Image: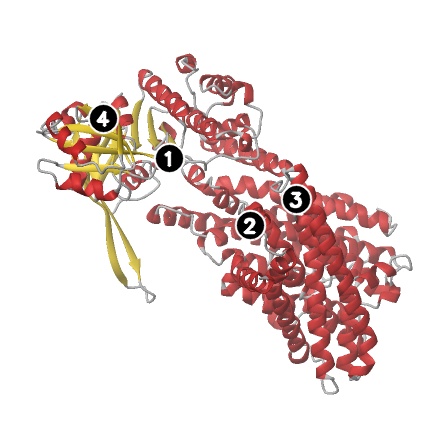
Amino acid sequence: MALRVFWGAFLFGRKGLIMWDSWEMWVMQIVITPIAQIGFFALLSIYLQYPPSVTQYIVIGNAIQSMSFAAVFAVANITSQDKWQGTLPSTIVTPANRVALFIGRAWFQVLLAALIAAAGLLYAATIFGVSFADADFLGLAVAVILTSVAMTGFGLLISAVGLYMRTALIVANIFLFVTLLLSGVNFPVSVLPTWLQPVSWAIPLTYGTQAVRMAVAGASFTTLLPTLGWEALDALLVLAAGYALFTGFESLSRRTGRFEEY
Amino acid sequence: MGALSELRPGKKTEGYFAKRGQVLKACIILTAKLFFADPQWIIPSIIAPFIFTLVAFFLFGGQASSSSFLLYLVLGSGLMGMWGTTIYGSSNSIGFDRWNGTMESTLAAPVPLSWIALGRVLFNTFEGVINALLILVIGLVWFQVGFGFVNPGLFFLASVSTFLSLSAFGLLMCTVILLSRKGGFITNSMEIPVYIATGTMFPVSILPIAALPLAFLLAPTWGIEAIRLSAIPGYVGLATNYWTDLALLAVETLAYLVLAFVLFKRVESYAKRNGTLDEY
Amino acid sequence: MSQQIPDPRLAIEVIGLTREYSTRSFFGTVSRVTKALDGIDLSVKTGELFGLIGPNGAGKTTTVKILTTLLTQTSGEAYILGLDVRKDLYEIRRRIGIVFGGERGLYNRVSAMDNLRYFSDLYGVDPAVARERVPQLLKAVGLSDRADERVEKYSRGMKQRLHIAKALVHDPELLVLDEPTIGLDPGGARDIRNMIREMQKQGKTILLTTHYMFEAEELCQRVAVISKGRIVALDSPSELKKLVRDISVIELRTYGATADYVELIKRLPNVVRVIADLDSEVQSIRIQSPLGADLLSQVTSSLPGDAKIIDRTIKEPTLEDAYLRLVEE
């Protein structure tokens, strides 16, 4: 039963988001925005006359970060869309297993996010001159997919907030930009003030960028394992928190009657 | 009810500019009221540029010690904020009517659509200015830079001129949004490329030659140069003169306005031929 | 008959109006032409309350859009208050008020007062005049005490009243009401109809489109019936009813009537037409026949055992019967 709900929700997640139905949105999400974002920070690095290794650092970081929109924002959009279209009460009322329902919807986002990150790495190689000669592709693939899952989990966390508060989309938006600053995308976490660093390590993307860089440089899969392990743990915590918040907010919404406070 | 007979007859405003001025004022006020009814959407357009600045700050590392450099950074951030608002808020000014269901009411009004759009655009771009000011203040306080602009008067002039040119650009983007289903896609994709092409964070001179014509055709590029020349001590930039920058800005802004008004006429005749602008 | 065109006594004058929609294929060649309007002629006198009725897709909305300058015609002429809809757009718009049916057309996040002030500026009402007129309008439509609330909190009926206030904000000479009572509860609809009558008393010309035949019959001095892009009849409701004076109408309300029963009635001799609504718990069946009461016994005896007639009435034909005959031909 849970599996059927999951699959149905997956298909709905794919079609239900109006945003993904036109080829223009695909082009924008997979081609234009990643290249523009990578380009912006790469050009900044060139302007500052940093050595190519720094530019490469920045390029890879942004290539991975560019998946965040699909992973985080679009998933947070699911509950917002439900509110917009007024389907939220009908969804809540079904006896369907909560976890299966929402994770099913998000699964499509995971694949999409992984695709965007992969595209970003492709641009890194072809446009921005990053060398993948020594890369460990297995490690790279695992890192990308794991990060994708983890970041989508973050999106689920935010969508749980979206059940009750109007501001889920704004929170998601802010989070997207905060990752630029805190997740080792453009500079190492160590550059940040000490009090801020623990926040960085709570975000799965931070481990992800680190792992991807190591994989591109040629680190073996076993060398990557500790970082990937921490990321997986972080992802589980995020998912658990998301689920807890979700059921918490759901009962809060039922008690106060406030789903549709969009 | 039954009081319809007691209504004062509706005397009308006369005169070309009086009529349009009245419409402009009404649209600015309505857009302002709609904005204040739901102001939380402003947050992303403040957060984004501010975060970009913080990132740039950390990237600039040791170089970020001179106050004029920090001023450069913070101004760039403010300008990105203005651009972002123009691209999202301004260009969607009239598109808002479409998904709000008020497009028919708007098209039925006895004034050209361009004037209604202009009123909306002016407020939305102005909101961008407020954004930019907020970012400027936060940035200057955070980075503890002094407010020592080279020439505050010229800075003000350059800022107002840039605001006007952004409005004209926003108006032009309105026509793109209305005329083509892909309009929204075009304007949304433009965000970061425009930050790059107008030299908000780094000069356009480092762009590949192929991108330069685009950069020079964007009027706000010149406004940004003028702003920096009048604010940052020792700024050289594109090695143009402040007044040359403003002149180029004025010429290009005028061109945007003319093009926008022409395209709006097209929008209106399209709407009348097909009976609707409602296809998204 | 040398009549001046446009005729200054007419508020609306339409001559040979057509409107075609062409769908284009991928390569831009025209693949199909649909005629939404196929030569409409009508005229509305100043101060008249004129109705336009017809089935969905008949061309009512298309006609209204052309007359309100929101759509260009393919051929033919249309004059509003003596002005050409093709040339004198802005002048026409200044002098007419339009009420679109439905929920859209208002700014929901601001108050009724804000909406009316905005539209009065848009229509160029002198601001000093508007300051007095807007509150008066709100009072006239019964929204004074909630004028400062956001429109999103209004009921459907309240929004519709606001639509009417909005259409009147610039004191137009001609009002076009496109299905103004659709979706309203009976009380709300009645309020709107009263307002329409009052506006006519003010000397305003009113063009009304509606689905509700009784509404057209109640309010309109003349009615045009449009079907498949053409006017099939144009006259006062009483004259139109004469088209069906040969029939009487039996109205039944039943429990348990089925589609089979309706078919059975249709096959009875002398039955002209049967219109049935079987969806509710209590079904209503309307039978047109020249026989009237004489048919009643046959109708009741054909009733299956488990069904029951709650109510039966014999009536004079209404505008709806005339309309049905006209559009089904």
Answer with left or right where residue B214 lies relative to residue C321. right
Where, by quadrant of the figure, is residue C31 drawn?
bottom left
Which chain is disc 4 placed on? C
Q: CA distance from mark 4 to mark 2?
A: 62 Å
| Camera-nearest label, 4 or 2 | 4
Same subunit: marks 3 and 4: no
Amino acid under disc 2: Ser
- Name above or below for residue C300 compared with residue B74: above
Q: CA distance from mark 3 to mark 4?
A: 54 Å
- Residues at discs 4 and 2 in contact (Cβ within 8 Å): no
Name the residue rendered at 52%, 33% in the picture.
B21
Tag 4, which secondary structure? strand
Same subunit: marks 1 and 3: no
Residue at numbered disc 4: C312
Q: CA distance from mark 1 to mark 3?
A: 41 Å
Amino acid under disc 4: Arg
Residue at numbered disc 1: C90
Answer with left or right where residue B59 lies relative to residue B271. right
**Residue B218 spot, x, y in % from top left:** 60, 58
- Residues at discs 3 and 2 in contact (Cβ within 8 Å): no
| Camera-nearest label, 3 or 4 | 4
- Judge the density around disc 3: few (<14), some (14-19), many (≥20) Cα neighbours within 10 Å: some
Residue at numbered disc 3: A166
Tag 1, which secondary structure? helix
Residue at numbered disc 2: B91
Amino acid under disc 3: Arg
